[in-house]
Amino acid sequence: MSLTGNHTNSALLTDLYQLTMLQGYHDAGMEEVAVFEFFVRKLRPGRGFLIAAGLEQALEFLENLHFTSDELAWLASTGRFSKKFLATLETLRFNGDVHAMPEGTVFFPDEPILRVTAPIAQAQLVETRLINLLHYQTLIAAKAARIKLVATDKLLVDFGLRRAHGAEAGLLAARASYIAGFDGTATVQAGMQFGIPLFGTMAHSFVQAHGDEELAFEHFARAQPDNVVLLIDTYDTEAAAHKVVALAPKLEREGIRIKGVRIDSGDLAEHARRVRQILDAGGLQHVTIFASGDLDEYALRDMLAAGAPVDGFGIGTRMDTSNDMPYLDCAYKLAEYAGTGRRKRSEGKQTWPGRKQVYRRYDADGRMAADVVTLENDVQPGELLLRPVMRAGRRLAQATLADMRKHAAANLAQLPEPLRQLHEAYNYRVEIAGALHELAARIDRASTQTQENPS
Amino acid sequence: MSLTGNHTNSALLTDLYQLTMLQGYHDAGMEEVAVFEFFVRKLRPGRGFLIAAGLEQALEFLENLHFTSDELAWLASTGRFSKKFLATLETLRFNGDVHAMPEGTVFFPDEPILRVTAPIAQAQLVETRLINLLHYQTLIAAKAARIKLVATDKLLVDFGLRRAHGAEAGLLAARASYIAGFDGTATVQAGMQFGIPLFGTMAHSFVQAHGDEELAFEHFARAQPDNVVLLIDTYDTEAAAHKVVALAPKLEREGIRIKGVRIDSGDLAEHARRVRQILDAGGLQHVTIFASGDLDEYALRDMLAAGAPVDGFGIGTRMDTSNDMPYLDCAYKLAEYAGTGRRKRSEGKQTWPGRKQVYRRYDADGRMAADVVTLENDVQPGELLLRPVMRAGRRLAQATLADMRKHAAANLAQLPEPLRQLHEAYNYRVEIAGALHELAARIDRASTQTQENPS
């Protein structure tokens, strides 16, 4: 019953139906190449655009895909699968191609951000984990981008691990928000694993354990002389600000400079104003004010509009859970099998068939003007967004996190002005090209006349 | 930049400030025993009660706590910590005591569900991951319990991995919902890892890849003869139901029985009614109807109130993300250091000091009547809810998932009737005992007179 172990790349991170379908494909001799695409169906109010993220982990998962002998033995023990089929899983690897938008790319509904081309068993099996990885990071990158747009020139730090949904969510939220423009995270493992800059100083417990707040400040400053940011709201925020002023000269004599204070409760804007006055009157103009506690893009907008003198923000729970919209309506759908376009016509969930490409057009100022979704072979003017990232199961040149951050910043700068606001009534134009309409109509006609049978 | 590796028990799954505080405690020679408690501050509309979950993973984390040599080398490379302090991390293990409510216990705000008693460095370091583990599973167990209360006698299956926030969230959601009364999950790894029953059949892609829906049904039935649940909404739900009726006798002759059909789009209640009629008219009264797609407790309540003939539900995204409330206002707070009660007085976030116990009283019908939160040594009548689960860093007798399910079911049966409804205007009585009020007042008086200095 242990969580321990290398499970983040397990082939069993999948829904049971993928395996029962694979048994079905196997028995029916269906081994042709399938094309699946990951896209978001629609945006809801509160998100005018999204940021592609999670590709690196998705490709890593594909590159490492295999069943361990323990996993195969366990699958056999369930009695659900034939021996012949299980033998095929033993050698199953992902050797398909992947096209994708680079991480950090702004995208919109109906636009595939990842396209998998592989024998159907491989392409089908990986559905669950691919969605799981792309969905969450895209969700968080979009949320973080909104925060960045509101507080462009402020220090922004991810504080969300504790209330993120599990360890992986915390780590990936640190990564996704960093791509979207955050300056760093408090999550230590994200520092080691991804090289993301770390931020952090003290909690209330440090002050409480000392009992004496001033002594706690002093102890902390000596222990972390290059990183003196003092948490001042454990008992009385303004009283603590006065203690900081009193302590500063003593520490200066030891060569220690107080860098900042953090406020984590109450009316943050009002406290920030009062604390700024106290610090300035005490000659501590260089000491910055950092705020945290239940923050999101709306709270930041209001604080900054009110002129609150805050230099940086710790954003935790509401970003890492994407509190106002904890999921996207996304899907990974079959678009082609054995060379023939496929679509689903379920009510409210129809999909466009065929392997697709997305083109982006810009206006004279270099701002995004409109996108076109069309078939891969229907070449259009504009910038081509889906690029080859994996061939025959091997990753092509990889981007660094720094590249992705730069790419996201450039994309955010190219957003149409209304999309840079939090209240998006603006619908960016995504055109479904004639080629897609025609293919869909042809498939629908064919399936109502003589049904296809590719097996 | 890899996610691969055993990171779910890493000591670096923590906020940087835990390590900077540990450096501070170390330098100040503060090594006394601290008591920290995990609790939920308040409930918001939409949750009348919570279900404790995640304890097993929390204890596993504590039992395995250590820094690897790679982690220590990396911490040293950051230049943030002294050599002397890093040497103490090399041998750091968790050897404290833990008291907790058993998983599956119903609980309310202000009630600690876990209490850690350990030298302050150990108790502090683990804050982030303990909250991360207890918060998410408690969140999901509470959500799942609401679904279970609405659809008590229906088959309930977790479908949420793909849109859960990362792999760990998907696995832990399967576990938490199973504790709360779900029948199983689609997540294969949760089957292998936790022994949770698995459910799953086919996706739309299986039908699309075949093109011919009837052929897809036939292939699936032969490949999974004991598990024939057919997805009937890829093109036209009622037309597919007629195909199921036509196919049934052919399969029966091969000794294969169709068990059920699944509907995943459109007006689920209306489709279920029409499909039920078609199946019944075709002599398939034994074939069950399973529904999925954007479901939660509210959708289930409405469908069941409308008399929809649905036998089971797949509940995914909205449960695994706890869509209507993606986080709880929870905390892990210092309650005592070096034998002295401690509290925080930050605005809106005051805590009760001292090591606590929770007692529960029942009415004549065996329903929960009221809880009392008091100091550990202030014995009260009623059932004692916090029990020893770890001593000197070693877990005591462990409950099985079956035990936890039974415990949760018993607790749900004891809920006051208003809390069994979805619209809870009912506030369960949680009394803060006089002993806590007195200790808090004593601490506040002491800190305003002569400030304590335990170092």
Image: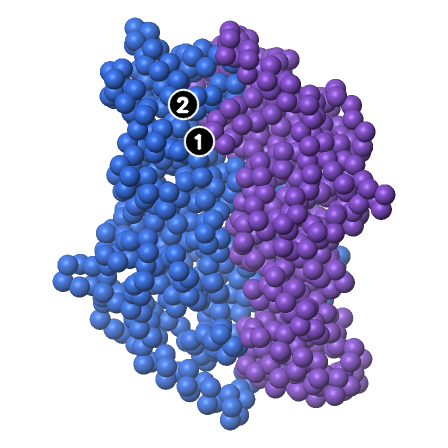
Chain colours: A purple, B blue
Q: Which residue is mark 1?
A: B265
* Residue beneath the point at 51% across and 24% down: A345
Say whether marks 2 and 1 touch (CB < 8 Å). Answer: yes
Taking the image as drawn, is residue B181 in sight? no
Residue B275 in the image: state x and y as whole percent: 33, 24
Residue B89, quarter of the rendered image: bottom right
Residue A275 in the image: state x and y as whole percent: 67, 81
**Label 2 secondary element:** helix
Disc marking residue B237: 2
Relative to residue B120, is residue A80 drawn left or right? left
Residue lying at the far bottom in this picture: please name it: B449
Q: What amino acid is labelled 1 in the image? A: Ser
Disc marking residue B322: none
Give me the chain letter of mark 1: B
Q: What amino acid is labelled 2 in the image? A: Thr
Residue lying at the far left in this picture: please name it: B364
Residue A440 or A57: which is nearer the viewer? A440
What is the spatial separation of the Cα atoms under label 2 and label 1, in whole angstroms? 9 Å
**Label 1 secondary element:** loop
Residue lying at the far right in this picture: please name it: A364
Closer to the chain start, of discs 2 and 1, is 2
